[in-house]
């Protein structure tokens, strides 16, 4: 960033306007290396959300060299469309200095300034001196971050010596401060609010901060929890507050209440632990189109009831969250690659398939006339290949003149917390052909199978006179039960 050090404060007043999100690293499915495509995907998503800047959360399970590469990837993907910042919270001052140098070299605009967790300063003067040395070593803009996690309460009850902060605000490249505690916000604003930008990252405080303290940027945080790229609620209401459209802004503020309540219930219990639930925050982002994926151990966990609560919150503010959850665990990009690989490996041509009836007589697909019922499935353990066969049979059957295929996929019982009636209604509404759905329990029981994970595909004609099997070991008695079940549900 080719800006003179003495011009950085003015630059910040002009450019640091709007919402800054956090960007977390994505990994390969085995977490052994960075997933560059996934990281780039999240940068593009940050741009689509309308954020003016994204903060590389580099303290999230990375080696130091990986952290540098992570920042480099984000900055390259950002181009001229979004600013890039970096957290400076590494294990030593040597690493902090190296990241300062690297971030400046690759073109980042600022750092969120922190201190190593094992540093134990004895005085306010020591904190100021070390901070001064670090700031003097770079031309990057500095955002002060007086979090209580440094254990500086022993030097001042606010959590950070206020006289030291006041002196830091005079440094040429210190342009802003990120503060979350109301009393500290007020005291900082009183002491040096005319010198650097004040930012409270807590969304709930935005109306007060904008109207009372003139806050012009909020960050950094996982603000995707309040919006999607298609519905940028937070970006819009923050802009409206700053533009004086208070009634419109507050209408959105109150509309976001369900998401705010759920988010704060999930986030606040972890906020004073010294780290954050990166997994949970990546889940928020994934729900509205982000890459998702887990970070490395040690990390906090996210449980299904928390995921369901999050999805409910999104629905209550008019955003339909992404599905299925299994995609989140490996990341959107990795999941798509795996799915494409499986589809290629299981690609089948059913046009010349020969089936066997119960007497093991071979009958080709061309024998079918009239309405044909194609059933396939096999609970959660069913082979992907079998599902592919079932879908191919449907396509081939529907392509034949005079043949109408009806798909029926049998699976195991849904989890207790899933509303079965709503799912069944949704599937029925969206189905291209009428689906035969069994939510009464184990689909294998209906089919007469002893192993619910046995993949199965079989075809029955309208009259039930021709029965063909492709997989699974069905007795005549079992198939008769299936036909009775089909007649009941038609």
Image: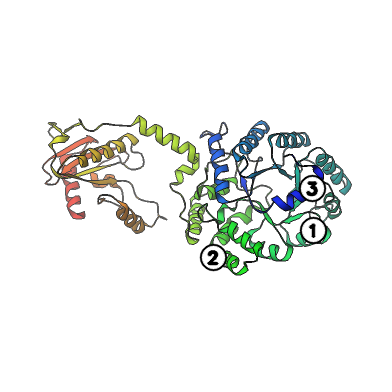
x and y percent of residue 105 in the render?
71, 34
- Count all numbered tags in the image, as a single digit: 3
Q: How is the image coloured?
A: rainbow
Q: Position of residue 334 (x, y in %)?
A: 48, 36
Mark 2–mark 1 CB contact (< 8 Å): no
The mark that comes first in sequence, 2 or 1, is: 1
Would you call the spot at circle 1 few (<14 residues within 10 Å), some (14-19), or many (20 or more)?
some
In the rendered image, the quadrant that contains the C terminus is bottom left
For the residue pair 52 and 426, the one nearer the viewer reads as 52
Q: From where the camera sits, is residue 455 visible?
A: yes
Say what secondary structure mark 2 lies in.
Answer: helix
Spatial distance from mark 2 to mark 1, Cα to Cα?
31 Å
Judging from the image, what secondary structure is the residue with disc 3 in? strand
Q: Residue at x 79, y 58 (%)?
A: 193
User: Rounded to the nearest whole Å, what is the CA distance between mark 2 and mark 3?
Assistant: 36 Å
Which tag is nearer the camera, tag 2 or tag 1?
1
Q: Which part of the image, by quadrant, shows the N terminus?
A: top right
Left/right placement of residue 79 relative to residue 160 reads left
Identity of the residue drawn at 21% across and 42% down? 398
Q: Earlier in the sequence, mark 1 or mark 3?
A: 3
Q: CA distance from mark 1 to mark 3?
A: 12 Å
User: Disc 1, disc 3: CB below 8 Å?
Assistant: no
**Is label 2 in contact with label 3 (beta carbons under 8 Å)?**
no
**385 or 42, nearer to the observer:** 42
Give the mark toward the camera: 2 or 3.
3
Q: Who comes first in sequence, dot 2 or dot 3?
A: 3
The residue lying at 72 percent from left, 44 percent from top is 110
Residue to which mark 1 is pinned: 193
Q: Which residue is mark 3?
A: 174
Residue 250, how many percent across, how many down?
A: 60, 67
Instruction: Point out which mark residue 255 bears.
Output: 2
Label 3: how many residues lie within 10 Å, few (<14), some (14-19) or many (20+)? many
């Amino acid at each position: 960033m080719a800006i003179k050090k003495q011009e950085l404060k003015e630059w910040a007043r002009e450019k640091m306007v709007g919402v800054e999100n956090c960007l977390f690293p994505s990994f390969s499915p085995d977490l052994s290396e960075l997933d560059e495509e996934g990281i780039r995907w999240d940068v593009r998503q940050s741009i689509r959300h309308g954020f003016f800047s994204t903060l590389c959360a580099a303290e999230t399970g990375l080696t130091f060299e990986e952290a540098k590469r992570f920042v480099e990837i984000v900055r390259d993907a950002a181009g001229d469309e979004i600013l890039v910042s970096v957290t400076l919270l590494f294990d030593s001052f040597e690493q902090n200095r190296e990241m300062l140098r690297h971030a400046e070299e690759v073109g980042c605009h600022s750092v969120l300034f922190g201190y190593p967790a094992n540093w134990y300063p004895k005085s306010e003067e020591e904190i100021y001196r070390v901070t001064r040395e670090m700031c003097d070593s770079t031309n990057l803009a500095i955002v002060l971050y007086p979090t209580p996690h440094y254990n500086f309460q022993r030097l001042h009850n606010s959590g950070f010596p206020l006289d030291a902060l006041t002196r830091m605000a005079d440094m040429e490249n210190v342009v802003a401060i990120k503060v979350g505690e109301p009393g500290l916000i007020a005291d900082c604003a009183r002491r040096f609010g005319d010198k650097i930008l004040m930012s409270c990252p807590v969304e709930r405080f935005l109306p007060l901060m904008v109207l009372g303290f003139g806050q012009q940027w909020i960050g950094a945080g996982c603000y995707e929890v309040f919006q999607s790229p298609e519905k940028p609620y937070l970006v819009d209401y923050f802009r409206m507050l700053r533009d004086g459209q208070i009634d419109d802004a507050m209408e959105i503020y109150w509309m976001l209440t369900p998401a705010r309540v759920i988010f704060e219930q999930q986030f606040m219990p972890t906020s004073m632990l010294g780290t954050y639930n990166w997994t949970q925050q990546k889940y928020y982002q994934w729900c509205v189109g982000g890459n998702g994926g887990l970070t490395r151990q040690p990390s906090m966990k996210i449980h299904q009831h928390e995921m369901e609560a999050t999805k409910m919150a999104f629905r209550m503010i008019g955003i339909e969250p992404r599905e299925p959850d299994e995609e989140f665990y490996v990341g959107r990009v990795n999941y798509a690659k795996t799915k494409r690989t499986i589809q290629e490996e299981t690609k089948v041509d059913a046009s010349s398939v020969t089936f066997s009836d119960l007497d093991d007589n071979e009958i080709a697909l061309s024998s079918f006339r009239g309405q044909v019922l194609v059933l396939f499935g096999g609970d959660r353990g069913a082979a992907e290949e079998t599902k592919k066969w079932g879908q191919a049979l449907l396509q081939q059957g529907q392509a034949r003149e005079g043949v109408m295929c009806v798909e029926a996929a049998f699976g195991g019982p849904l989890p207790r917390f899933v509303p079965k009636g709503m799912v069944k209604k949704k599937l029925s509404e969206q189905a291209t052909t009428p689906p035969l759905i069994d939510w009464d329990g184990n689909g294998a029981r209906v089919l007469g199978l002893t192993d619910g994970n046995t993949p199965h595909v079989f075809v029955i004609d309208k009259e039930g006179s021709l029965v063909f099997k492709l997989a699974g070991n069905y007795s005549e008695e079992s198939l008769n039960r299936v036909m009775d079940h089909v007649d009941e549900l038609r």
